[in-house]
Image (cartoon, rainbow, N blue to C red):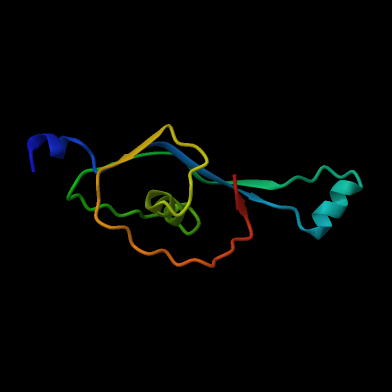
Amino acid sequence: MSAGDQSQPMLSLRGISKRFVKPLDVAGKLAARLGADVREQIVHAVDSVDLDIARGEVVGLVGESGCGKSTLGRMVAGILAPSEAASTSRAAMSAPCEVPTGARPRWRSR
């Protein structure tokens, strides 16, 4: 590995964000039709994260339940598309792992 390879991060994220929209349930839809000011809830799962990981570096994400660790990992793995990203880049990596399919989340991403 040359010195130039080590200066480039293996993974670089700038301003990566993910939002999910929780749709209204039946009661909420009915209330909205009757004139109540009820709207879909927008959840900011990941908000403007910047991250550089160098080749050979080990990184651990630590945080409370529901703070966005898994969502960030899914975006890095390409399982979820970010809602916003100023820039992302990754160096050539080994073959991707298989991702199980069939999960149907109740919330849609925005």
Q: Residue at x 30, y 55 (%)?
A: 60
**Direction from residue 29 to residue 65 in the image, left or right:** left
Find residue 24 and report its horizontal and vertical position in percent.
75, 53
Q: Residue at x 62, y 55 (%)?
A: 107
- Looking at this view, name the residue that lies furthest to the front: 95
- Looking at this view, name the residue that lies furthest to the left: 2
Residue 12 can be seen, yes or no: no
Indicate the quadrant where residue 4 lies: top left
Q: Residue at x 41, y 51 (%)?
A: 78
Vertical position of residue 47 compared to residue 102: above or below:
above
Where does the C terminus fall, quadrant-wise?
Answer: top right
**Direction from residue 33 to residue 72 in the image, left or right:** left
Q: Residue at x 62, y 52 (%)?
A: 108
Q: Nearer the viewer, residue 7 or 93?
A: 93
Q: Nearer the viewer, residue 65 or 20?
A: 20
Q: How many marks?
A: 0
- Looking at this view, name the residue that lies furthest to the top: 86
Vertical position of residue 99 compared to residue 94: above or below:
below
Residue 82 can be seen, yes or no: yes
Indicate the quadrant where residue 87 lies: top left
Find residue 6 and report its horizontal and vertical position in percent.
14, 39
**Direction from residue 83 to residue 62 in the image, left or right:** left
Find residue 97 and report its horizontal and vertical position in percent.
33, 62
Find residue 77 and report its horizontal and vertical position in percent.
38, 53
Where does the N terminus fall, quadrant-wise?
Answer: top left
